[in-house]
Amino acid sequence: MRRPTHPRRYPRHPLDEDLRVSRRRLGRPRRNRRRRRIPLLVWLLAILTVEVVAVGLKDPRFNLARIEVQGVEVLTEEQVVRRSGLRPGKNLFQIRLKEARQRLLEVPAVADVTLHRRLPNRVLVRVHERQAMACVAAKNALFTIDATGIAFRKDAKPPRGLPLVTGLETKPLQLGGRIDAERARELREFVEAAAEYPQRGVPRISIDQNGNLCFNSAELGYQVRLGPAVQLKEKLALLAALERSLPDIRDRCQYIDLSCLEAPAWKPKKVALATNDHAGESRPVAPSGETLHGRGGFAQD
């Protein structure tokens, strides 16, 4: 006869059941004590927090006494404090820093700003101003714009060290306003590309309604027509190569047209007329080493 594979079960003794019940009963009070301790600690911490806040709101040592401003160049510290709405004497914990930040962000010259409480009685204001990219001649005035095209400063005359942009005089501009996004992108790309050639000085940039660029500067001495704002780095590199190959181009050239990289062109300055004393006639005089049809291997207009 086959034996069963499952283990044989014996009846439980009544004492074993009583031991299990007693163990459960002994363990319950411990758990209950732990559960009672946790809410008690929470209540104590809550009461302590309320007391600290109440003391902080009433203690004059926490009244705002000083406002520190960092990162301003276009604005003054007084302007920042006035526009923020912060007033000395108010309790530090009652000041609404979010509202003060929102008021400062409405200032055209402010790109971003952060405010921090510094115990016991200070507020630190860190201002990130817009960085000037160019001065734009609009219909109504001159404005300094940043890389995104936002006008954040009104100028009586072009600031030193900034390129002057013309060709946008058809529309008025206001502080906090923005020029056309495409024109701003073209200007930004040109300024970034021209930064590699600081020896040319601060350029005067002209941009037409089709986005064609040309520039000039006192150091350069002639006009450079770049055409559409594409391949600007390549066009300026070609201009540098032409200047190296023609060291006297400043005295000879009226403008260089780099609209097409494959076919650059240039126009010489007006040719002087010399008088033939023997025949009483005038004849054109070409500069030494240059024909009237241009030189240097690129076309003459």
Image (cartoon, rainbow, N blue to C red):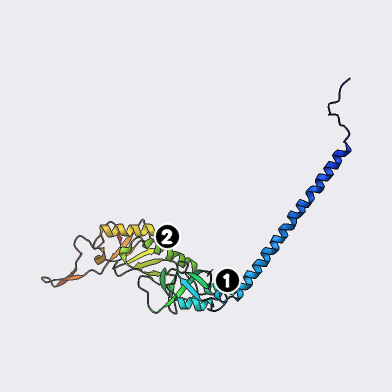
Q: Position of residue 298 (x, y in %)?
A: 30, 58
Residue bearing the label numbered 1: 98
User: What is the C-alpha distance between the residues marked 1 and 2?
Assistant: 43 Å
- Farthest-out residue, left: 278
Q: Is residue 108 visible?
A: no
Task: Decide if residue 295 is on the left or right side of residue 125.
Answer: left
As rendered, which of 64 and 69 lies closer to the eye?
64
Quadrant where the N terminus is found in the figure = top right
Quadrant where the C terminus is found in the figure = bottom left
Q: Earlier in the sequence, mark 1 or mark 2?
A: 1
| Structural crowding at the residue carrying mark 2, measured as other residues with C-alpha within 10 Å and reported as few (<14), some (14–19) or many (≥20) | some
Q: Secondary structure at mark 2?
A: loop
Q: Amino acid at mark 2?
A: Val
Q: Amino acid at mark 1?
A: Lys
As rendered, which of 187 and 134 lies closer to the eye?
134
Q: Position of residue 141 (x, y in %)?
A: 43, 79
**Residue 162's quadrant in the figure?**
bottom left
Q: Position of residue 108 (x, y in %)?
A: 49, 74
As rendered, which of 20 and 211 lies closer to the eye?
20
Which label belongs to residue 230?
2
Residue at 86% from the left image edge and 23% from the top image edge: 3
Q: Nearer the viewer, mark 1 or mark 2?
A: 1
Q: Is residue 78 above or below residue 253?
A: below
Residue at 32% from the left image edge and 67% from the top image edge: 201
Q: Secondary structure at mark 1?
A: helix
Residue at 46% from the left image edge and 78% from the top image edge: 78
Which label belongs to residue 158?
none
As rendered, which of 291 and 49 lies closer to the eye?
49
Q: Position of residue 236 (x, y in %)?
A: 35, 60
Q: Is residue 17 visible?
A: yes
